[in-house]
Image (spheres, rainbow, N blue to C red):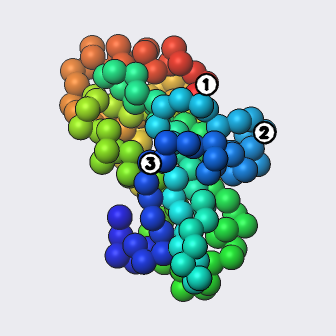
Amino acid sequence: MSDAIDDFIIVTEVDRGPAFAEPIFQRKYKASVPDFGHHVVAFWKRGDGSFVPASYVHFTDCGDIYLAGGAATDGNVLRAMDEAQRRALEHYGALMLATLRYGFERWGPRCDAVFTCCGDARALETTPKVGFVDTGVPHLLVRWMREPTPQRRRELVAKARSFMPF
């Protein structure tokens, strides 16, 4: 991740995503965490040594592509961090970036691309920092994990579009 946040942020996949991320997800989307796929959670390590879910993203395996969706961060947790931790996160970019990078490292080698559906202004400012680019389809962004031919790109974009919204 980054030496600046490694001391107080732990990012990992969890088997029971709803048990960890339901409140964060509900607050943002007014819906339940998906009950399938890959749940990535960034935990904040508090001063007492306990861990609190701080950010979440869901990855769905679709064979040659992965879908990254449902990104959400708990602002209350961020506000509970001390000033040095908040500054370190600000320097890092955003906590959501840590969850996305985890997914890219873990599943990126298995696919041609990772797609995300994004309409949130803040997320649209943040996602290019991890390599997401516009696809030409409204709200659909991609991070190419390999360099496909133009024809293959069109096919993969069409495939991801068929899952929208996600």
Name the residue rendered at 69%, 46% in the picture. Answer: 22
Q: Position of residue 159 (x, y in %)?
A: 43, 15
Amino acid at pointer 1: Pro
Q: Which residue is mark 3?
A: 13
User: Above or below — where is 61 with respect to 133?
Assistant: above
Distance Cα–Cα, label 3 vs label 1: 23 Å
Residue topped by disc 1: 165
Q: Nearer the viewer, residue 8 or 73?
A: 8
Q: Which residue is mark 2?
A: 30
Q: Nearer the viewer, mark 3 or mark 1?
A: 3
Indicate the position of residue 32 as horizontal and vertical percent values: 71, 36
Q: Amino acid at mark 2?
A: Lys
SS under mark 1: loop
Q: CA distance from mark 2 to mark 3?
A: 22 Å
Note whether residue 128 is visible: no
Mark 2 or mark 1, whichever is nearer to me: 2
Among the two numbered marks 2 and 3 on one chain, the one whose residue lies closer to the N terminus? 3
In percent of the image, x 54 and y 78: which residue is there?
49
CA distance for labels 2 and 1: 15 Å
Quarter occupied by the N terminus? bottom left
Is residue 9 or residue 160 the one in the foreground?
Answer: 9
Identify the residue shown where x is 44% and y is 48%.
Answer: 13
Q: Nearer the viewer, residue 106 or 92?
A: 106
Mark 3 Cα shell of 10 Å, populated few (<14), some (14-19), many (≥20): some
Dot 2: element: loop
Q: Quadrant of residue 78?
A: bottom right
Q: Quadrant of the C terminus?
A: top right
Q: How many marks can you see?
A: 3
* Label 2 or label 1, whichever comes before in sequence order: 2
Q: Which mark is residue 151?
A: none
Q: Secondary structure at mark 3?
A: strand
Query: Residue at image x 53%, y 73%?
Result: 45
